Image (cartoon, rainbow, N blue to C red):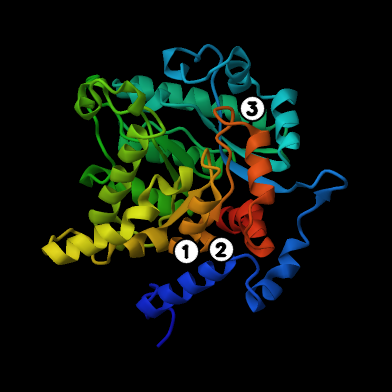
């Protein structure tokens, strides 16, 4: 039996082979597998005397347009971090150096575009944000790249803006903050709906990843958190919302229609790697049907990548590698919401194999983005 079937899908045996490899690497060096990949690790330098691993690529790192710091960014704890969100120059580059990050892929901070109910305004603001980002990338072309902000309120306009950003501005994909509010403030539209199919066709044609970032659920949809506002943040409510959105995409049959789509989830997969077996198991046991042809775990392994953004926990990382394989994990910090130094101190010394550390640090990203 082969690892991949005639349609290019990973077979059941192939999945267990991947899991076995991931299990081995999670238990430190993986013998022959480690030897096979050690040549790749030579691409990473270590600053003498510091133990700092350099050459990392980080791809959930944020900025804000001048004047865009408002109540949406109240989660930034200090005046310094609010400044960091707007710093597109030397200060940001210095922080990257402190974390051993060679290249950052920047995206506008939460939620801005998706929270503008008026489609025409969302289109205008997204274009302004993308032009601003391109202007600053041009000053540091070897250190910064960009994810497009998209007006998902209008699928056709979003496809056109992504095309412009990729072909004219040199961006490497898109990052979108979850659902969009369309027409009225109390609305939440998700991208599994039929009107978004032409947009997804454009994403696949452009051959760029789509980063699905979480956002705060609307205040009118927080009944489960009443009396417990501490739950209504990126650490829980937003992650649940993003995981649900990802499952909607899977269950809608989107990846059957566009099998080459690549979606990125932050924060070690927003909890999905830990729940995906149970989701498939219960769907099967209860005979629940979706519009999808394959299991949810197959889509998660074949169409999704996850990043380490804001989740600096080795036990959780090992679980993700066991479920998805180290080839599907990408390094990220979530700067300035998280600290570059804390992220690199954890990652550089996490007890994983050196070949896997290299993959996660940069080689997976280079393959995904064709750097």
- Is 84 located above or below residue 56 in the figure? above
**Residue at the extreme bottom:** 1
- Answer left or right for 66 relative to 57: left
- Is 339 located above or below residue 124 in the figure? below
Q: Are marks 2 and 1 in contact (CB under 8 Å)?
A: yes
Task: Name the quadrant of the N terminus.
Answer: bottom left
Q: Which mark is residue 135?
A: 3
Q: Could you give the CA–CA distance between mark 2 and mark 1, rounded to whole angstroms? A: 8 Å
Viewer-side residue, 305 vs 7:
305
Q: Could you give the CA–CA distance between mark 3 and mark 2, rounded to whole angstroms? A: 41 Å
Residue position for label 2: 26
| Mark 1 crowd level (few <14, some 14–19, many ≥20, 10 Å Cα) | many
Viewer-side residue, 339 vs 147:
339
Q: Which mark is residue 322?
A: 1
Task: Give residue 67's position: percent from left, percent from top.
Answer: 52, 11
Marks counted in the figure total 3
**In the structure shown, which secondary structural element does the residue marked by tag 3 occupy?**
helix
């Amino acid at each position: 039996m082969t690892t991949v079937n005639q349609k290019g899908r990973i077979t059941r045996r192939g999945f267990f082979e991947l899991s076995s490899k991931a299990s081995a690497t999670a238990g430190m060096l993986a013998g022959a597998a480690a030897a096979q990949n050690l040549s790749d690790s030579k691409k990473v330098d270590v600053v003498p005397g510091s133990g700092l691993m350099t050459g990392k690529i980080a791809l959930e790192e944020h900025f804000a347009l001048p004047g865009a710091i408002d109540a949406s960014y109240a989660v930034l704890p200090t005046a310094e971090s609010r400044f960091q969100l707007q710093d597109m120059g030397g200060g940001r580059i210095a922080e990257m150096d402190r974390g051993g990050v060679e290249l950052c892929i920047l995206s506008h901070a939460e939620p801005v575009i998706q929270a503008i109910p008026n489609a025409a305004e969302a289109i205008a603001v997204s274009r302004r944000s993308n032009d601003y980002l391109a202007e600053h990338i041009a000053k540091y072309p070897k250190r910064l790249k960009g994810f497009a902000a998209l007006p998902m309120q209008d699928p056709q306009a979003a496809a056109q803006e992504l095309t412009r950003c990729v072909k004219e501005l040199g961006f490497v994909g898109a990052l979108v903050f979850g659902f969009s509010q369309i027409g009225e403030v109390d609305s939440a539209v998700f991208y599994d709906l039929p009107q978004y199919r032409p947009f997804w066709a454009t994403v696949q044609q452009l051959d760029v990843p789509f980063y699905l970032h979480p956002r705060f659920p609307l205040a009118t949809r927080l009944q489960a958190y009443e009396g417990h506002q501490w739950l209504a943040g990126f650490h829980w409510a937003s992650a649940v919302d993003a995981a649900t959105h990802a499952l909607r995409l899977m269950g809608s049959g989107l990846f059957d229609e566009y099998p080459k789509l690549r979606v990125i989830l932050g924060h070690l997969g927003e909890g999905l790697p830990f729940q995906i077996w149970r989701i498939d198991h219960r769907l099967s046991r209860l005979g629940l049907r979706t519009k999808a042809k394959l299991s949810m775990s197959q889509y998660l392994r074949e169409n999704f990548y996850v990043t380490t953004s804001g989740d600096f926990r080795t036990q959780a990382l090992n679980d993700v590698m066991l479920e998805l394989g180290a080839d599907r994990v990408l390094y990220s910090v979530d700067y300035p919401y998280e600290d570059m130094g804390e992220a690199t101190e954890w990652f550089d010394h996490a007890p994983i194999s050196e070949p896997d550390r290299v993959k996660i640090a940069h080689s997976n990203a280079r393959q995904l983005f064709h750097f």
